[in-house]
Amino acid sequence: MLLSILGYDWEYLYNIYLQILSEVLVYVKNFALYICAWVLSYLLVCGAVYRRYARKLPTRIRGALGAKRVLIVIAHPDDECMFFGPTIFRLCEQGTDVHILCLSNGNFEGKGQVRRKELWSACQELGVPVENICLINDTRLQDSPKVQWPVPVIAKLIHHQLESLAVDTLVTFDRGGVSSHPNHSAVFYAVAFMFVEKIMPQKCTVYTLDSVNILRKYMGFLDLPLSFILSSKRYFLRWTESRRIVRAMKLHSSQMVWFRYLYVMFSRYMVINTLRKVNLVDIELELEVDD
């Protein structure tokens, strides 16, 4: 009697509710099946790419830069493993003369001496000879996201290494610095400075390491298809080879806090590097974007 007074047909409304709920459940089920099918397809593509390229191509041509002597410029000890590991490992395996220029001793937490030793050990694990490692200890280049590194100072240090070692290929960070660390970006701006001031050796080819969005950054091997589509220069490692990078990274024991273990597990930079060749025109365009 109360329902009639209120004027509601509750049985009818209840049936409508059940109908809507049923339709929503069907939609959710179909959407879940669609997502599962998409994920499975992508995993199959990743497997196909890995099998075709990572396993069957001869080591000597996997991402080869055609370089004889390469200088890798990093900002801190552990950058060589966290970001450039696949490139360094593969170049050394291909017989390229690889040199490392580290612009600070990583003394942000007062562990400069410890991190110096860790850098030497990690580079040896990657295949870089001890005599090919150069670490700069300059008070103007302190390891800190709050310190603005003077670009002309970095440019002068890089130029000296390029000339004294007769380097034909330079590899370093791009403008994003992979992790947006200001010290990483400062290295890129130093290279840009060298191009603009026309002090970059003409015979030196320059490549920068691609920074990617956070989703791709932590996709690990699953980033293989995108890396092949979006970049013509890439270094990637087989599963067994990537363990070498992990071992090298773990030699930086002073830096292995809990979130670094997560980084080692999921970061694409432990297994894949994509590089971009840059010249004066590219640099000027990027600097215009900054302005």
Image (spheres, rainbow, N blue to C red):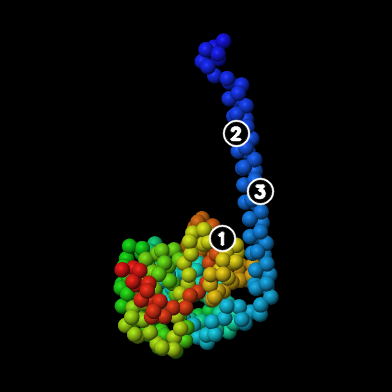
* The image quarter in which residue 8 lies: top right
Which residue is rendered at x = 66% and y = 80% of the image? 58
Between 265 and 22, the one lying in front of the other is 22
Image quarter (top left, top right, bottom left or bottom right) of the N terminus = top right
* The image quarter in which residue 158 lies: bottom left
Q: Which residue is mark 1?
A: 219
- The amino acid at mark 2 is Ile
Q: Earlier in the sequence, mark 3 or mark 2?
A: 2
Give the x, y percent position of residue 121: 52, 73
Instruction: State the CA–CA distance, disc 2 to disc 1.
Output: 37 Å
Q: Which residue is mark 2?
A: 20
Q: Are marks 3 and 2 in contact (CB under 8 Å)?
A: no
Between 185 and 114, the one lying in front of the other is 185
Q: Earlier in the sequence, mark 2 or mark 1?
A: 2
| Residue 141 visible | no
Which residue is rendered at x = 66% and y = 59% of the image? 41
Give the x, y percent position of residue 119: 48, 72
Q: Nearer the viewer, mark 3 or mark 2?
A: 2
Instruction: State the CA–CA distance, disc 3 to disc 2.
Output: 20 Å
Label 2 Cα crowd, 10 Å radius (few <14 / some 14-19 / many 20+): few
Give the x, y percent position of residue 114: 45, 68
| Residue 199 visible | yes
Q: Nearer the viewer, mark 2 or mark 1?
A: 2
Position of 30 compared to 230: left or right? Answer: right
Q: Which residue is mark 3?
A: 33
- The amino acid at mark 1 is Met
